[in-house]
Amino acid sequence: MNRFKLTKFRYAGLAAAFSLLLAATPLAAQSAVHLGSGVKAGEITDTTAIVLVRLTATPGQDAQHLIPGHTGQARLRYGTEPSLSQFIMTPWETARAADDHSIHFKLEKLQPGRRHYYRVDYREHEKDPVVLSDVFSFVTAPAPGERAAVMFHLTTCQDLRGERTYVPMTAQRPDFCISAGDTVYYDGQGLARTVPQAWQAYQKMFGLPAMKDYYRHVGGYFMKDDHDYRFNDSDPHMVGKWVNPNKADAGAKFTEKKGNQRLDVAWLTHEEGARVFRQVFPMSEKPYRTFRWGKGVQIWMTESREFRSSNTMEDGPAKSIWGAEQKAWLMATLLASDADHRVIISPNPIVGPDRLMKGDNHANLNGFWHEGQEFLDWLKEKKLNNVVLMCGDRHWQYHSVDRRNGRETHEFSCGPTSDEHIQAVPPLYPGVDRPYSASRGGFMSIRYRPETRALAFDFFSMAGEPLYQKIFTP
């Protein structure tokens, strides 16, 4: 049987009642296999989605806040009715240790603009009793030509202290969430230097009760940045991180010496960092992608780590964060779009401003400034006036308006998820205005209203208090 060929089962009456009875039995408590990491639906279009299921040895976090994986088998039953009295069932798939015990189910031929419900059947071995999970759900995008209401969240820079922010986020009932990078910090507390340690970082963060509760019924799109890829300001060309050996932890492995700095090479490689991210989240084949949510909104998510030039390269036309292929794709798909609003989300700022000592993004004079300004000039040349930029990575909230080339370009940064993770707001560049900025933690909500074709950007605090709003009309 083809890996993703779907077999349809139709149940009614007694069969539906049996399913509900099965879910109510204590099989889950008796089973050696659990869904301790929760579930995640992601990469959702109008007709497709990917559901990630991770089989675990515990029903939740253990005393070390970890959720050990467990080999076993799983399949999905899904449909558009909450009772799942009629459903489609996928074939059984196997969770393997090499994949962090994660299975990616690719669902196709879904109905546009509908909430889809699903449950997980799972077991340890083929002859073991089958355990049926709770009901989870996600909503598909509207058809490309339909104007329909859309609301989504944007987050970035999160550590364990940001868990409580997901409580008011859950209460808002968004259609989906975009995590714009730094979803965990490999080089933060509890260093993650190896692949197993990187997996554990996600167990600690996304295994938190409020996080699991949020993603029960909210789809996600996940982007990576430096801290959830390798280490601070990392690029594919670095073999390690330069550190003061007196401040290094016990896991460091030193090679080269430069002044009072030593090169610590005990970190994930470029290949490992990219592979782990694809394992722990529902992901498309390519890390840069665009998703259409009806006629009203199209969203671009760029990749800023895998294809970049070396950070130490002299800035100029040859230096790039995006790489030639991604840049050509970005420009071509932007020109081809007829959406009311085009939203480009980058893990790093293009407008900024950013801190003066930084040098790894488009908003840095000693970084990738040339490519950033070239792209802003291209937007002006093509008269793409319905483009809004958003970014992660920055530890403060802001709305900036760039007028340096005679065109208004708006950029929003949602800031970190927690107030404990904030940094001071840097000074402005000449030619850039800042209607709003704050050293605050929280999240952003973006809402499209089809009746007015307006797109509203709202900042919220950790507690869900409204802080600032900007509305764009076409």
Image (cartoon, rainbow, N blue to C red):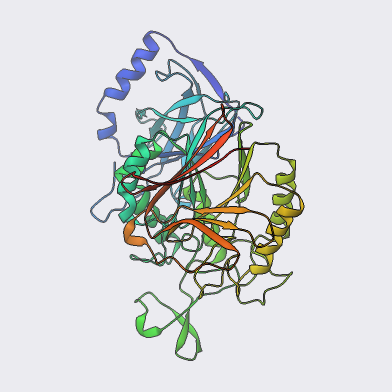
Q: Is residue 271 above or below residue 113?
A: below
Q: Is residue 112 above or below residue 360?
A: above
Residue 407, percent from left and from top: 68, 55
The one nearer the camera, 96 or 205, is 205
Q: Is residue 337 left or right of residue 175?
A: right
Residue 52, percent from left and from top: 47, 40
Which image quarter is the C terminus in? top right
Residue 140, quarter of the rendered image: top right
Residue 210, percent from left and from top: 31, 43
Q: Residue at x 57, y 30 (%)?
A: 452
Asked if residue 4 shows in the view, the reply is no
Q: Is residue 194 left or right of residue 322?
A: left
The one nearer the camera, 313 or 118, is 313
Residue 350, percent from left and from top: 59, 60
Q: Is residue 64 left or right of residue 87?
A: left
Q: Residue at x 39, y 12 (%)?
A: 15
The residue most toward the bottom is 259
Q: Is residue 387 above or below residue 125?
A: below
Which image quarter is the N terminus in? top right
